[in-house]
Amino acid sequence: MDIEAVRMFVALAGKLNFTETSRLLQVSQPTLSRKIKMLEESLSVTLVHRRGGHISLTPQGETFLIQSESLLEHIDRTIALVQSEQQDESGIIRIGCLHPMAKFITDNFIVNFNKKYPHIAVHFKTMIPRTLNSFEEVDIMVAPFWPEDDSVVAKKLPANRRYCFASPQYLAEFGTPEDIKDLSHHHCVTQTNAVKMQKSWTLQNKQGHQEEVAVTGMMASDSTDITIELIKKGFGIGLSGRYKAAEGRSNGELVELFDGEWFTESNMYILYKQNPYIPRRFKIFIKEFTKVYTHIIGTDHL
């Protein structure tokens, strides 16, 4: 149904005069007459009696007027709501990410964000690597890869460094590796939320030199928190950001290896579908999250 024609009909029903209505709507009288005629044809009913210079509504026109006014009111309310969500700091944001990132957001970001923007609701969708490219159920995604889809916009976040840690008990039993190549002879706690099974670590130093080291172990995890607990319990050497390992280092449960000279480095990306009308709440979330992420992850580089 042509909503513009419905609006014209409602205006005409109020004036019962084509000339006055066309002046009110700032359209030509032939255009108004043609629109009303096309509306009648689409409904297969006559809405307006035309008698010379006078017009009146048919019984069907009277019924259609009542329903049209209700319909247009509903449409106008819907448009106002959509525009409010578009421009104001309100509405829902559906965030898709792996479980560790969801934990990072809830631990470090969501409380202050909610206090600052109480009318923005955040709905989390925890995902697995092979589904971390579907926007069917999410608006914004935080992912550890650059998208292949050209319709997706990617904002690169600061590099995330993870360093090698072990427990004092493990080192006492198996010895302290002096060189990163020694890792291939140690038990390592590997990662299970990678796209492929993790069989090696690519470590680099501050000079940019990289070494790929084979790693094996009896324990693996898709959670940084669980990885740290496994390291503390002596199951092997694992990777963690310094901000996550800070408590364990301070109380002596974790030891950083290689004097912090070697680490893995990867990037996270904020992803969202291209859209000329990005809701303001999306922009707010991206800006605020980037600020917090940069502050926390940036301290790991010091």
Image (cartoon, grey):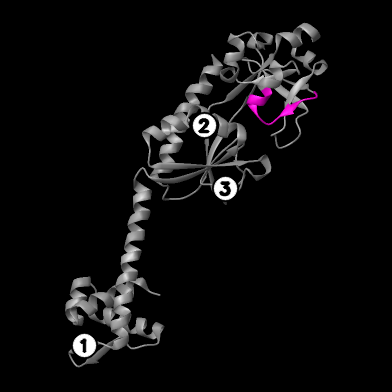
Residue at image point 52% right, 32% down: 105
Answer with the quarter of the image where residue 245 lies. Answer: top right
Where are the magenta residues, as a range?
A: 217-227
Mark 3 or mark 2, whichever is nearer to me: 2
Task: Indicate the amino acid at tag 3.
Answer: Asp
Q: Which residue is mark 2?
A: 106
In the image, is residue 223 part of the stretch drawn in magenta?
Answer: yes
Answer with the quarter of the image where residue 24 lies. Answer: bottom left
Asked whether disc 3 touches disc 1, contact meaning CB atoms under 8 Å apart, the reply is no
Query: Viewed as shown, does residue 197 lie left or right of 287?
Result: right
* Secondary structure of residue under mark 1: strand
In the image, is residue 211 part of the stretch drawn in magenta?
Answer: no
Query: Viewed as shown, does residue 296 lie left or right of 44?
Result: right
**Residue 137 coordinates in the image, percent (x, y):** 56, 50
Considering every residue shown, the one lying at the far bottom of the view is 51
Residue at image point 34% right, 45% down: 88
Let me know if residue 237 appears in the view. Answer: yes
**Residue 103 coordinates in the image, percent (x, y):** 57, 31
Q: Which residue is mark 1?
A: 55
Asked whether disc 2 touches disc 1, contact meaning CB atoms under 8 Å apart, the reply is no
Q: Which residue is mark 3?
A: 150
The dot on residue 280 is none
Task: Indicate the amino acid at tag 1.
Answer: Ile
